[in-house]
Image: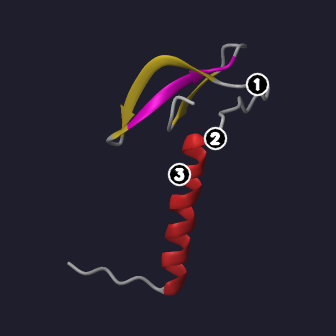
Amino acid sequence: MSLKFTRHARIAIGIAIAVTALSAFAAQTCIIDNLRMIWTGDTVVEGGKILYVVECPQGHKALALSPN
């Protein structure tokens, strides 16, 4: 099976991959109170991907691509 993408599609896919990779290593901050999120030690599998449960000091929880 051969997939052919236009130049714009290849650029869009490359940007999406780069943003995902960078967000995996960026420090997570809470979207509610802008405090640093800390990994709780728990993981969740969704869509075949391992996601990490992170929590801010105020107790807000979120899922992240890395425990950083």
Task: Identify the residue at horizontal 50%, vertical 38% (top origin).
Answer: 65
Quadrant occupied by the N terminus: bottom left
Q: How many marks?
A: 3
Q: In the drawing, does residue 29 fall left or right of residue 10?
A: right
Camera-near label (3 vs 1) is 3
Location of residue 45 with respect to 42 vertically, above or below: below
Disc 2 target residue: 26
Residue 3, given in percent of the width and then of the height, sits at: 31, 79
Local SS, label 3: helix
At label 3, the amino acid type is: Ala
Q: Is residue 20 magenta?
A: no
Q: CA distance from mark 3 to mark 2?
A: 9 Å
Is the Cβ of the residue at disc 3 closer than 8 Å to that at disc 2?
Answer: no
The stretch in magenta equals 50-56
Disc 3 target residue: 21
At label 2, the amino acid type is: Ala
Task: Identify the residue at horizontal 53%, vertical 51% (top origin).
Answer: 21
Mark 1 or 2, nearer chain start: 2
Disc 1 target residue: 35
Image quadrant in which you'd find residue 25: top right
- Residue at the top extreme of this rendering: 58
Give the crowd class for mark 2: few <14, some 14-19, many >=20 residues within 10 Å: few
Mark 3 or 1, nearer chain start: 3
Location of residue 18 with respect to 34 vertically, above or below: below
At label 1, the amino acid type is: Leu
Give the crowd class for mark 1: few <14, some 14-19, many >=20 residues within 10 Å: some
Q: CA distance from mark 1 to mark 2?
A: 14 Å
Quadrant occupied by the C terminus: top right
